Amino acid sequence: MSLTFKDKLKSKDFLITSEISPPKGTDLKEVIEDAEHIRELVDALNVTDNQRAVMRMSPLAVSRTLLDAGHEVIMQLTCRDRNRLALQSDLLGAYAMGIRNICVMTGDHTTKGDHPKTKPVYDLDSVQLLSIIKKIKKGYDLAGNRIDNPPDFLVGAVSNIDQSKSAQMMKLRKKAKTGIDFIQTQAVYDIGKFEVFMESISDIEVPVIAGVIPLKSAKMARFMNRNIPGINVPDDIIDTMENTEKPLDEGMSVCAQTITELKKLCRGTHMMPIGKHNNIPKILEMADIRKKDQC
Amino acid sequence: MIISSAKPFEEVIELLKDKDDIFVVGCNACAAKLHVGGEPEVLEMCKRLEDEGKNIVGWVIPSAACSVASFDSLVEKNTAINDAKTILVMACGSGVSIISGIVDVPVYPSNNTESLGGRSQGEVIPELCAMCGDCKIYYFGGICPKGQCPKRLLNGPCGGAVEGKCEVDPEKDCAWELIFNKMEKKGRLDLLEKVWTVEELSE
Ligand code: SF4
Ligand code: SF4
């Protein structure tokens, strides 16, 4: 049997994860196609949970579909849409459906999404949910009742990568204290800054999987700088994107260079290709990792 | 204080569409301080309703609409309330509830009740406290994340703030930015390092 994500996390391998967004609808064709583009190139697929508070199919259903198609998944779970009962019950359901890896986050506020009047839940925060998962793994629910056949999840959390944001760093330490197995980060563009971040958490022994998003244009870079918290595309990259005739190719090349640098600094990369999964093989090839024929 | 704001007058008129012989009850506490239920606003409301052809039988401004003891105590202040077929309360939801409980005619609100906030240096500050029933504000330097952070996060910020402004409202400072800066100045960051588990919160 091939190695699981858990096994690989324990190895010295440089890990590749990628993101799959559930559909707005009931057709799973595109999800399966996206995953197919990167079969055997990535170690696990993160299935997002109503990402940016936009209503989509349940990540539980999509995760199971991908498992059935032979992929390994990391199911994301936000605190925005479920109270403590629903979170715990979805966790049990996910494990029973074969999901072994989860990644927990607070979740963007409902006002940012396509149903802005939704009552946000936030019954728990990410640190609290992580400590509850720890308890569940030991065989007890939050109320202290016994759980039969407790789930043995591999648990991840997310982080921004700006070491100067002290409050966020403090929270990351709280997450780490709950005994998480991996951290996936916001997209990295400024390797220097990321290095500072990695140094600042060198005492935390949790594998870090650094996010990357291939740029499509200089405009996209500027947009993200203005609107996506935690993303900081440096000016020289924006200039490169501005001055090229082939921004898509340049974006992929920038991304590949970033991944090459990341290999020296952390345990893996999390690729968020925004609908362009067919570009991932090329980017990985440029970064000189895991060409399909070598697998 | 309870923060409330005046409903648009059109909405009030719509509420009172088929109603007449209106008695207006103001509130000399929060609503008066916020200028949505004190004497000037009550008089203005009476005039506007009259301009719309309504008969106003009278008005009263109890010291606090939320703690009016009985119907008789309103009669004592203005007997005209005996002729009222409709009552309009210019106070928060608590005030409207208390008045509704002591009169027999239909009661309508003129205000929207928003949060528990305050007023300082002439500025109205909403959402200072979420009335959680388990006060922990001390640990956060007097800035309550349950009231002021839209995600009610006790263990640290969400990561959605942009240049110190809240993900939800770019006009508002991120509550956690304020908390962290204040505690840093005070040299009490140790208080923020505490992990708040669900088990130890009585919520
Ligand atoms: S902790 Fe916050 S919400 Fe709770 S009572 Fe104190 S100030 Fe109000
Ligand atoms: S930006 Fe700050 S105040 Fe707004 S939801 Fe996040 S932590 Fe709370």
Image: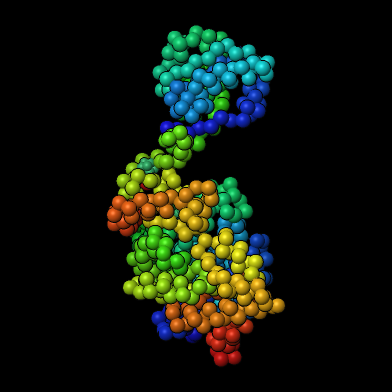
Residue B154: percent from left, percent from top: 38, 52
Residue plotted at (33% across, 43% down): B135
Q: Is residue B67 left or right of residue A215?
A: left
Instruction: Please say if A98 is above or below B50.
Output: below
Instruction: Please say if B92 is above or below A250.
Output: above
Q: Is residue B89 left or right of residue B181?
A: right
Which residue ends up furthest to the right in the rendered image? Answer: A245
Residue A90: percent from left, percent from top: 48, 60
Residue plotted at (53% across, 9% down): B80
Q: Is residue B39 left or right of residue A239?
A: left
State the scheme by which the image is colored: rainbow
Front-most of residues B141 and A151: B141
Asked if residue B17 can be seen in this view, the reply is yes
Quadrant the N terminus of chain B occupies? top left
Front-most of residues A101 and A204: A204
Instruction: Please say if A24 is above or below A45.
Output: above
Residue A96: percent from left, percent from top: 48, 67
Residue plotted at (43% across, 44% down): B147
Which residue ends up furthest to the bottom in the rendered image? Answer: A294
